[in-house]
Amino acid sequence: PKTTSMKIAVVGTGYVGLVTGTCLAETGNQVICVDINADKVKMMQNGKLPIYEPGLDILFHRNIAQERLHFTTDLGSAIAEAQIIFLALPTPPGGDGSADLSYVLGAAKDIGKLITDYKVIVTKSTVPVGTADKVRAAMDSQTTVEFDVVSNPEFLREGVAVEDFMKPDRVVIGTQSERARKLMGELYGPYVRQGNPIIFMDERSSELTKYAANSFLATKITFMNEVANLCELVGADVDMVRKGIGSDDRIGRRFLFPGVGYGGSCFPKDVQALVKSADENKYDFKILNSVIEVNESQKTVLSGKVKKYFNGDVKGKKFALWGLAFKPETDDIREAPALYIIDELVAAGATITAFDPEGMNNVRNLIGNKISYAADPYSALHDADALLIVTEWSLFRTPDFDQVAKLLKNKVIFDGRNLYDLQKMIDCGFYYNSIGRKI
Ligand code: UGA
């Protein structure tokens, strides 16, 4: 077990950087997080978290109080003492779908200018194959001091990021340097005490592992979405098919839930980027092109069902919408299917009143009064022609159906997440249309 604590700098305090920094402090390391956004740094110095993530606040406050977690805008002072420097900077999709590396490489240059002794530079952001080499070159152009570059992709899921960091299924470390390998192994030792592996490999394999993992999961979901669509046509129930196939260990029970298409800040971007880097290497990644296409159409499956039910005319109809965030336990609305559904229905002349436990502020900032916002799930229902469920928040799983029936104008529910039992819905007298199940 690790006995001495390490000195760590984390560059970039977005979602990944902040979770990484906080969780690394939790095992006794001295962590300093750097960001160019002075307002954000001030906020964190004052003990306020800029993001919502379950369980993060407790660790954040504890490690600040115990003076292991610090924040600064000054890169130089942050890295002066650090043995390991994590880069957790954004890699937004550029115009052509490939990841924009300007933040990562810019930081690498800056760090190159500043270092005076051996450092390990770790890329934590999701970066295309070959980025470690580019980071190395960017630094080499600025310094003669010795350093190593390591690829250490993150596999955190929003909503359970703290748990994922503290008890990862695996840690992937890409490096060919023995010195860096030893340091990284020590750093992650406390997180894999249950016996989960730290898998060491070369940088390129490590970089590709991240894209392959997300693309595989996106493919798994997309496959089930297509099975669900077929279930509706042949009169099968996707819930049964899901259980039927998921009990085979080779397939596994997880990530087989059909729905309104995958969204969020990772899957859409990473699948695109992997296709793009395949293209650049003159390889046609056919299956992923199909995944992208199917997912696009899956995002409008629910609005399509609504339109069909109202004979193609939803003009003047009023809909209640439960769930805006791309998934539960987050306020993240990036690539959220709800936004596509809203676009489709509002463009067709409908009005929408939405409720989401965490996502409403972000949606309001993005689309303003294009829709109305309710203070709680029930007040969204008043006089609505139908209820649409788009995110599977626990709050929506066991509503008071008598109330729901009373408040809605029509007892009609379109459920994009298969939350309710079919028989129960029949018993309660609802028209209930979900994904891949009988109506
Ligand atoms: C995903 C991966 O799961 C993480 O391992 C990875 O680290 C992360 O991307 C990343 O690259 O940073 P995340 O985007 O937070 O995490 O969310 P997921 O829980 O994976 O959900 C992604 C999307 O798939 C959501 O829209 C969700 O609703 C959808 N989904 C998931 C389904 O439609 N069906 C399922 O069975 C599972």
Image (cartoon, rainbow, N blue to C red):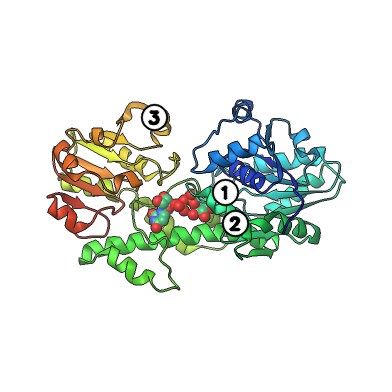
Q: For mark 2, give the secondary structure.
A: helix
Answer left or right for 305 relative to 134. Answer: left
Which quadrant of the figure has residue 90? top right
Q: Disc 3 vs disc 1: which is toward the camera?
A: 3
Q: Do the residues labelled 3 and 1 touch (CB within 8 Å)?
A: no
Residue 364: assigned label: 3
Residue 381 in the image: state x and y as whole percent. Answer: 22, 36
Residue 98: assigned label: 1
Q: Do the residues labelled 2 and 1 touch (CB within 8 Å)?
A: yes
- Decide which of 29, 360 is in the foreground and name it: 29
Answer left or right for 42 relative to 352. Answer: right
- Decide which of 430, 101 is in the foreground and name it: 430
Of callouts 3 and 2, which one flags the residue occurring earlier in the amino acid sequence? 2
Answer left or right for 319 relative to 409. Answer: right
**Identity, as a three-letter code, of the amino acid under mark 1:** Ser
Crowding near pointer 1: few (<14 within 10 Å), some, many (20+)?
Answer: many
